[in-house]
Image: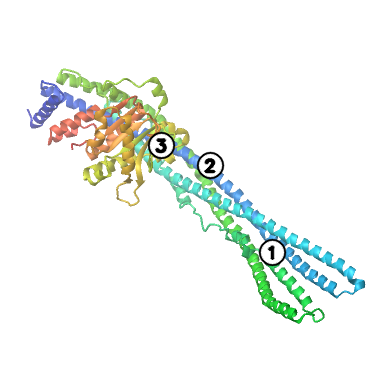
Amino acid sequence: MTPTLARLGLCALLASTVLGVAAAPSPAALKALKAAQDRLTQREQLHQQTLRAASEARQLAASVQATRTAWEASRQAGAAARDAVAAATDCQAQVPQALEAQARALDDFVAAQALSTQAVQAVVAADRPSLERAARASDTAFQRRATAEQGADDQREALRSLVQRCSSATRQADMRLDLAFDQQQTLTRRVTELPAQQRELQTRWAEAAAGHRAAARAGWVGAPPPDLTLPDGEVGRSLARAMSPAPTRGQRASDAALLQLRQPPADPLPRAQSLARLLDAVAYLELVNAPSACADAAGCDATKAEQRELAPRIAQAQEQLRATRLAASAAAREVASLSGPLRVELLAHHSALTLADTDLERVLNDAAADSQSADAALRTLQARADSALAQAEADWESAWRQAHGRAPEPRVNTVPLSAKLQMQARPAPSAAMSAAIDLRSHAYEFFEGWNTERKGFGAYTYVLMRSDKDLNNADSRRRFTRLLETLQKLPEAHLVDPTQTRHVNLFCIPGTRAEQTGALPVKYDSDLGQQLKLRTQNGLMTRKEVSQRLVASPGPFLITLPGRMADVSSSAPLLFADLSAYPDDAIADLATHYMNGLVNDFPSQQLLWKPPVLQRVALVMIHLATGTGDMVSTLMPTAQAAPR
């Protein structure tokens, strides 16, 4: 017996002991089992290559739809901004006219005040025959003065009302422009992402096609893959370069001028009324202090002193009225100038949107065609890969029987979650559950508070640690980092088409995205994580051996529910996975198996998830046979699994 076969036989014997088999298999049987394992590993790799390519095709299709939605949203936001800017500029154009009308009304009021003073003076100077006529003229003058004052007040109120409307319209235009620019940035980001996704699909298709061509030559599958040429997204990259960077808002339009018009210093009417009051007082004092009218010397001294004091006050009031009218005129010019920045901002957004309109339809059509043609081809390849994998599993089971004289326990199945559940003697999912949960893909998001996860997704998987203190441990930190890196290859939650969210499982990561590059991808919120785990202890996890893992193991953990944690009851189906026992290099592969299982068959009860049987067997045998490099290379279902 060669040294390699000796090591192989020893490893198999140890594994057989672990798995409960007393008799040692023969070298020939072990050799046949090793060959069957090799074939199964190869078929599984082909199967995974096909799954990854199909996932990329679906993600590209979802991105195309999301980009179309963002495009339409940007168009609508642009139209709303255009209408809002038009309303604001139309209103602003009326402000100078209203100010001019107020100025004319003030001039009429000042003139009427002077005429009323002259009329009073005429009454005082009139002789008896002309007194009645002078009195009637005085009444007319004061009536005109009252009318002029009311007119000035009406013009002031009209201006105030107009300024309020303009202020509201300006803020509305500013807000609409903000939204339009935000939508344009979203559109630019999506357009930029499309070429990368096309290139990734091209790469994944090339890998899957190469695998199927090799499989066809080896006779695993009946025919080679179809010839399919997928573009690498150069047209999209060209458009993305033209659209980048997305336009940003310049200096926002300020309604300071409009606010200034509302303040008393910018309202000349009160100043004019104060001046009129002083002028009336001095006119009266001039009359009573005239030599012909001043009979009481002591009294005249007092009124003359008062008249002298009025002179500087009148001069001050006149200056204040002049300054206030100048301020109002300046405000009118500033209001008129507000429309300029708004129109410039609108033009910048319109130019960016017009640029997108030139080639975006072509880019979207090309990407949609890529995803559709790849998806159609991959459906055929998937069926072939499934058949080849099923045959390899049957061959492996037969070889196991030959080696050990019995069927493997439990039954081998590396992908479907339903079979794994059957291995644990669990009932199959009910028809109602199968109809209610139809998962097709995955997404992820960071969230910062209880009951703040995005609503409407088909299932929710919470990514938790025992404590943020465990992240100080290098092994736990590496496992958590590998898991997050795997999840961050999925679309973010806000990118998912709202019409498709019910078919998407959302990975919810408590915390915020890390700001520093090279750091842990998330600032893990341990408080929120403990709050979530408290809810799982409160009836959601009825199996003690499962719930105790949250305390005994550092994590990371995956807890999947058919709804948000705050919305489900204690009887809700739940799938729990503890990844702490596996090497960090195997985390990505384990997470992929977990995601595939959720898509294939959502659990109907509260279960502890385990990796595929072959992967668990491989990890056990490798652990027992440390140093047997041949065994490591042949028993691992993927290149990622390694002993810890």
Please give the name of the residue rendered at 17% of the width and 18% of the height, measured from the top-left corner.
406
Depth check: 238 or 460 in front?
460
Q: Nearer the viewer's eye, disc 1 or disc 2? A: 1
Q: Which mark is residue 269?
A: 1
Please give the name of the residue rendered at 59% of the width and 54% of the height, measured from the top-left corner.
170
The answer to the question of whether label 3 and label 1 lie on touching residues, with beta carbons closer than 8 A, is: no
Rendering coords of residue 438 (x, y %): 40, 27
Please give the name of the residue rendered at 30% of the width and 50% of the height, measured from the top-left corner.
518
Please give the name of the residue rendered at 11% of the width and 21% of the height, measured from the top-left corner.
22
Instruction: Say whether residue 125 is left or right of residue 225.
Output: right
N-terminal of the pair, mark 1 or mark 2, is: 2
Rendering coords of residue 356 (x, y %): 51, 47
Determine which residue is flagged by label 2.
72
Can residue 213 be seen here? The reply is no
Instruction: Say whether residue 89 is left or right of residue 67.
Output: right
Q: Mark 3: which amino acid?
A: Gln
Q: Quadrant of the C terminus?
A: top left
Q: Mark 1: which amino acid?
A: Leu
How crowded is the residue under tag 3: few (<14 C-alpha within 10 Å), some, or many (20+)?
Answer: many
The answer to the question of whether label 3 and label 2 lie on touching residues, with beta carbons closer than 8 A, is: no
How crowded is the residue under tag 2: few (<14 C-alpha within 10 Å), some, or many (20+)?
Answer: some
Give the Cα separation between the discs numbered 3 and 2: 20 Å
At numbered mark 3, what does the secondary structure look like: helix, strand or loop?
helix
Give the Cα separation between the discs numbered 1 and 2: 50 Å
Determine which residue is flagged by label 3.
59
Rendering coords of residue 530 (x, y %): 31, 39
Give the Cα separation between the discs numbered 3 and 1: 66 Å
